[in-house]
Image (tube, helix red, strand yellow):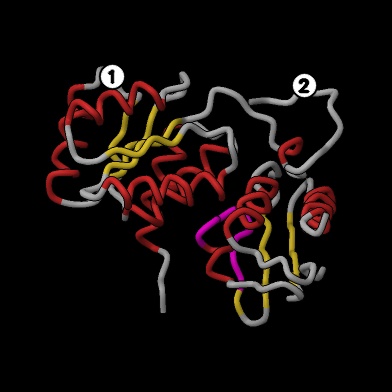
Amino acid sequence: MRLPDGVALHARPAGLFVRTAAGFKSRITVAAGEKRSDAKSILGVLALGAEGGTTLVLTAEGEDAGLAVAALTACVGAFAE
Amino acid sequence: MRRPSAAPPSVEPALHCAEVQGLVGIVLVSRSDRLARGLADLAGQVAGPDVRIEAVGAAGERVAAAIARADAGAGVVVLADVEAALDAAREAVGRSAGDAVRLADAPLVEGAVAAAVTAATGQPLDAVAAAAEEAHDVGKR
């Protein structure tokens, strides 16, 4: 998944991302380049410093993993709207 | 302000993923009024509009009033920086009845952001306070 151009995963988008992740039971990690974070940790996600256009790699393990990845992908896609 | 559930998705794409009520409130107490207000603004941007975040300078009675304003029925986490602000926060939390008001042992800025986002997800007081305190463990190098 790629962050839309011009939308960094900073304050407000990062908050939306983490709040969406928190709604799932699965363990979810998000990686940007060599950095990775628990997708439910706002401080971890902010520390990724992911700028617009960055490729994010989501990994989810658990009963709702598929739903979680779909929701987070939709969430990031909606940042550009 | 809350949208009716039938309203179409609008500018907050994830809010319908995380519909919650009775959120834990946050009180930020700083030696600097401006620091507290700026931090409340930042934490509010990250956490969204549903969490009550109150910012005050270091005066005991103002902290108590801010705790009352922040309380939406799920408890309040108080974060403070140093000196008189911390004293005022300790005093106000100590005077508040019961367990529903906590002084977080956390760095003010990172703790406030972590607590506000956790509160926005509808998690209980223990989890919000713990999120603030985990900010100690996030490295910067």
Quadrant in which the N terminus of chain B appears: top right
Q: Are marks 2 and 1 in contact (CB under 8 Å)?
A: no
Q: Which residue is mark 1?
A: B98
Position of residue A80 relative to residue B84, above or below, is: below
Specify whether B21 is left or right of B56: right
Q: x%, y% of residue B17?
A: 75, 38
Q: Which mark is residue B123?
A: none
Mark 2 belongs to chain? B
What residue is rendered at 74% in x and 58% in y? A60
Which portion, as a residue range, is magenta?
A36-43
Q: Which mark is residue B4?
A: 2
Specify whether B117 is left or right of B134: right
**Distance between the alpha carbons at the discs numbered 2 and 1:** 34 Å
Amino acid type for the residue under numbered disc 2: Pro
Q: x%, y% of residue B138?
A: 42, 65
Q: x%, y% of residue B32?
A: 24, 50
